[in-house]
Amino acid sequence: MPTPLPLPPRVATAPARRFTDLLRHGRFSFTERELMEHLRMTYRTIKQREADPSTLTIAELLRVADLLNEPVQDIIAVVLAEVQSGVSSPAGTPSTSL
């Protein structure tokens, strides 16, 4: 009787990064005040952008990229993937426009 073929190894798929993860759980840790000062946004605006990243402006995306020391293309890719996937925001409302 032939031996069964081995199963392919399981590839652990990393969960998709979200915009809020970039700000809150990235390689850097920022206080609310640091985020507000560097991004030039109020606390309320930051929370709104986290809930619906499709509302980010180009200038805001550039400031986020500078803050996180990442290419702006990577930040845009994360935001675009989140918006296209329709991932629900923490408030429970889906992000659908860009």
Image (tube, rainbow, N blue to C red):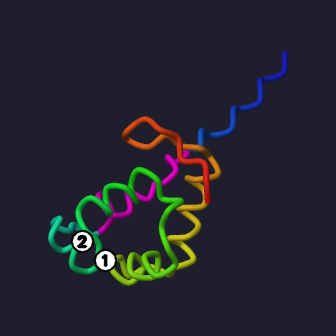
Q: Position of residue 83 (x, y in %)?
A: 58, 53
**Mark 1 and 2 residues: CB-CB less than 8 Å, in contact?**
yes
Three-letter amino acid code of the residue under disc 2: Leu
Query: Residue at (37%, 41%) from the top-left corner?
Result: 90
Three-letter amino acid code of the residue under disc 1: Leu
Mark 1–mark 2 distance (CA, rounded to whole Å): 6 Å
Residue furthest right in the image: 1
Q: Residues within 10 Å of mark 2 (few under 14, many from 20)?
A: some
> Where does label 2 land, which residue?
35
Query: Residue at (17%, 65%) from the top-left corner?
Result: 32
Asked which secondary structure carries label 2, the reply is helix
> Where does label 1 land, which residue?
39
In the picture, measured across the screen, residue 73 lies left or right of residue 36, that is right
Asked which secondary structure carries label 1, the reply is helix
Q: Which residues are magenta?
A: 13-27
In the picture, measured across the screen, residue 70 lies left or right of residue 3, that is left
Quadrant of the image containing the N terminus: top right
